[in-house]
Each structure stands twice: as C-alpha cells, then as structure tokens.
Image (tube, rainbow, N blue to C red):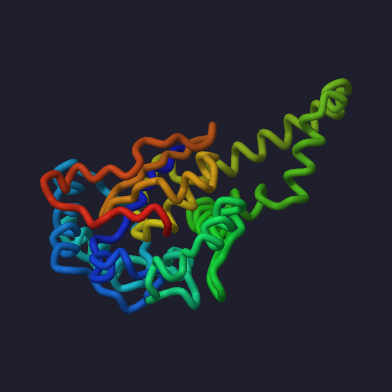
C-alpha cells in the first residue's frame, strides 16, 4: 500500500501582496490576477507530468478552492468532485487578522513566540499545535479511515507496546497473540487501495504545521520554512511510515516574481 499525497498551497491572494498586514484565515480574500496565473501554471505542470489524482480535497476558503478548481480544470477533473473540508483551512489569527504586523508582533510577543511557538496562539486564534492536530486528523480520518478507527486510539497504542514487550515473546501464547495482531493489522492495511494519489489544496501555515508533525522538526522552523504560492509538498506513506518526496516545489513558477516572504505567520 502506498499513498502519494500532494499538498499544494493556494495561488497568490490579494492580501499576499500586503505582507505588512496579518492575513490569517481571512475567509473572503480572493486570488490576485497573478494567483490565477499561478493556478493555471500549476495545472499545466500536473498535466504535463501526467499526474492523475484519485481524489481531490480543498480548503473551502475561496483562494484555495479557486486554485483547486483552476488546476483541476487543466486535468479534466470536474469541480463538482472537489471535496471541500473545513479542517483544511488556514491557521486562525483571531483578533489579529487585518491588523498591521509591526503593531501586533511587539518585542514581548516575539519573546513569547521564541519561548513556546508551538503552543502560542493569538487572542481567539489557533496555536500551531491546534492547526497541526486539525490537519493530521484529516490525514487519519479521510486518508486512513480503517487504520484511524482501529489502530490510532490511545488504548490500542498502549496495547501494542505490551505486545512488543520482550516478556510477551517468552511464551507461546504471547507470541501467538502478537503474531495474530500483526496479521490482522496487515490485513486491514492491505484493504486500502494499493496505490492512491491524493491532491490537497490548502494554506501555507496549515501545510507547514502538518509537515512539522510528520517530519518532526522544531516548531520554530515552521515559521522559517518557506511555502511559495502553489508550491507542492509531496509526501508518501507506506507500511514503513512517511517519506517526504518534495517540499515547496514551485518549479512551474520559474521566472515569476514571488510574494514577499514573512518569517512570522
């Protein structure tokens, strides 16, 4: 079993052109003219490379959905088949959205971020941890439904540790139980499609939080991790776990000027 998941950021939005203003979720912000072109170039690249998606998911925010719609049109995928999910939206910056970045990110706020970026959240907003958990819940529930239902609970995880303990391997009964469990788990894993290629259209910080969870790098690096508009972060999952194929691949935009990068989300 192998899942090939293509996480793609939306094209440039109108607010991406104003990096001095905190965007956050900003639900009604649309793509800029350049953003529409970027989405078309993304679709052209996917078509040229012969990519075929078995399913397409998108954040319902208009800038992400329009990117998905335009790219999928190039691939001949009907827009009606794009599944829009609230769990794929951008990190909420709560009361800070629409405010000037320099006024919000005071020296005191920056100190709090440096101390614990993972759990820090704006007033009425979300922390990286909250976004990470929301995004990974999508991965578990929509991409691995049986695995999530049967093997992702805390009780089962504790039971697996018991089965892996060396004392279990000392008795025939212990070995039999452990081997039976492994067989059952493999059978469930094998019921999933042998090879599935999934498209997920989302947002910069949402994708970076998920990548942090999967790859295990520090929360501080998530703020420094560049995520270009329509950049592709491709991750494969097999029985042996996660394997990153590419991060922020925006080769289809060579020659196009990118929106200014801001280290803070």
Q: Residue furthest top?
A: 170
Horizontal placement of 170 versus 13: left or right?
Answer: right
Q: Residue at x 27, y 67 (%)?
A: 18
The C terminus, quarter of image: bottom left
Question: What's the residue at 26%, 54% (across, down)?
Answer: 230
Q: Is residue 162 left or right of residue 179?
A: right
Q: Residue furthest front?
A: 107
Residue 44, how many percent across, how many down? Answer: 14, 51
Res. 15 in view: yes
**Along the line of sight, the residue nearer the viewer: 264 or 165:** 264
Q: Position of residue 104 (x, y in %)?
A: 46, 69
Quick check: 253 above or below 93? above
How many numbered marks, from 0 up? Answer: 0
Which one is in front, 264 or 86? 264
- Closer to the camera, 114 or 76? 114
Q: To which quarter of the image does residue 177 belong?
A: top right
Residue 128 at x, y percent in the picture: 54, 57
Identify the residue at image location x=58%, y=60%. 120
Where residue 98 sits in the image (x, y, percent)? 38, 76
In this picture, residue 231 sits left or right of residue 213: left
Residue 134 in view: no
């Amino acid at each position: 079993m192998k899942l090939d998941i293509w996480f793609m950021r939306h094209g440039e939005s109108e607010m991406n052109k104003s990096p001095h203003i905190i965007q956050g979720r900003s639900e009604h912000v649309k793509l800029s003219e350049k953003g529409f072109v970027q989405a078309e170039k993304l679709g052209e690249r996917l078509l040229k490379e012969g990519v075929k998606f078995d399913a397409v998911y998108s954040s319902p925010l208009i800038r992400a959905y329009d990117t998905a719609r335009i790219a999928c049109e190039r691939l001949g995928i009907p827009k009606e088949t794009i599944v829009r999910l609230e769990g794929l939206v951008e990190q909420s910056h709560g009361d800070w959205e629409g405010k000037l970045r320099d006024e919000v990110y005071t020296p005191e706020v920056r100190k709090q971020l440096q101390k614990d970026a993972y759990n820090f959240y704006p007033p009425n907003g979300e922390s990286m941890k909250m976004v990470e958990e929301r995004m990974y819940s999508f991965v578990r529930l929509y991409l691995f439904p049986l695995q999530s239902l049967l093997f992702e609970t805390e009780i089962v995880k504790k039971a697996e540790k018991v089965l892996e303990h060396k004392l279990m391997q000392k008795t025939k009964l212990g070995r039999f139980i452990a081997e039976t469990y492994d067989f059952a788990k493999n059978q469930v894993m094998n019921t999933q499609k042998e090879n599935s290629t999934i498209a997920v259209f989302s947002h910069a910080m949402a994708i970076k939080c998920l990548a942090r969870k999967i790859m295990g790098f520090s929360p501080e690096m998530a703020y420094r991790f560049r995520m270009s508009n329509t950049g592709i972060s491709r991750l494969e999952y097999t029985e042996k776990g996660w394997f990153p194929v590419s991060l922020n691949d925006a080769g289809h935009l060579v020659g196009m000027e990118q929106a200014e990068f801001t280290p803070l989300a």
